Amino acid sequence: MFKLKVSSRSNGKLFHCEKCGNSYTYIRCLKRHMLACGKEKRLTCSFCSHKTHRQDHLNLHMFHKHNIVPQAGKPIKEDN
Ligand SMILES: [Zn+2]
Ligand SMILES: [Zn+2]
């Protein structure tokens, strides 16, 4: 049997990032966060101060906000 030790449910956030202290309700949210948190890879838009952790997000941003088509050669997807 699995028993998860959880802290008090006072704020409903049960999972905490050890690096930055962000807390999440679901473990999958924490895991997703820790991928970005661990890498600290921060991409900044060349045309404004927009920041993101993901290259595809930056590509989408540049496409929609600045009409710049990224040179990566990958098709831009609207969904996620
Ligand atoms: Zn973190
Ligand atoms: Zn921008």
Image: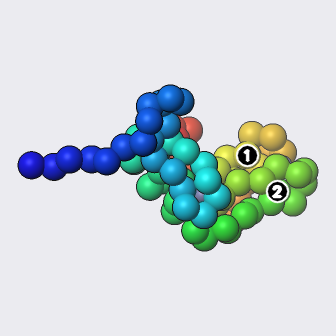
Camera-side residue of 77 and 23: 23
Q: Are circles 2 and 1 on residues that touch, CB within 8 Å?
A: yes
Could you tell me if residue 25 is visible in this image?
Answer: no
Camera-side residue of 43 and 22: 22
| Residue type at tag 1 | His
Instruction: Please tell me in which quarter of the rendered image ligand 1 is found.
Output: bottom right
Left/right of residue 58 with respect to residue 78 in the rendered view: right
Position of residue 68 relative to residue 40, above or below, is above
| Residue type at tag 2 | Cys
Residue that extends furthest to the front in the rendered view of this protein: 8
The residue singled out by tag 1 in the image is: 61
Q: How is the image coloured?
A: rainbow
Give the percent coordinates (x, y) of residue 29.
46, 45
Position of residue 9 relative to residue 46, above or below, is above
Dot 1 lies on which element?
helix
Give the percent coordinates (x, y) of residue 41.
67, 68
Give the percent coordinates (x, y) of residue 54.
62, 58
- Which image quadrant for residue 31? bottom left
Tell me the residue at 81%/40% (across/down).
Answer: 65
The Cα–Cα distance between marks 2 and 1, rounded to whole angstroms, is 8 Å
Tell me the residue at 53%/30% (across/down).
Answer: 11
Label annotation for residue 44: none
> Which tag, 2 or 1, sits closer to the chain's start?
2
The residue singled out by tag 2 in the image is: 45
Q: Is the shortest distance between ligand 2 and the CB of mark 2 under 8 Å?
A: yes
Camera-side residue of 7 and 79: 7
Question: Mark 1 Cα within 10 Å, few/some/many (few <14, many 20+)?
Answer: some
Tell me the residue at 44%/36% (across/down).
Answer: 8
- Which image quadrant for residue 14? top left
Could you tell me if residue 43 is visible in this image?
Answer: yes
Q: Is the shortest distance between ligand 2 and the CB of mark 1 under 8 Å?
A: yes
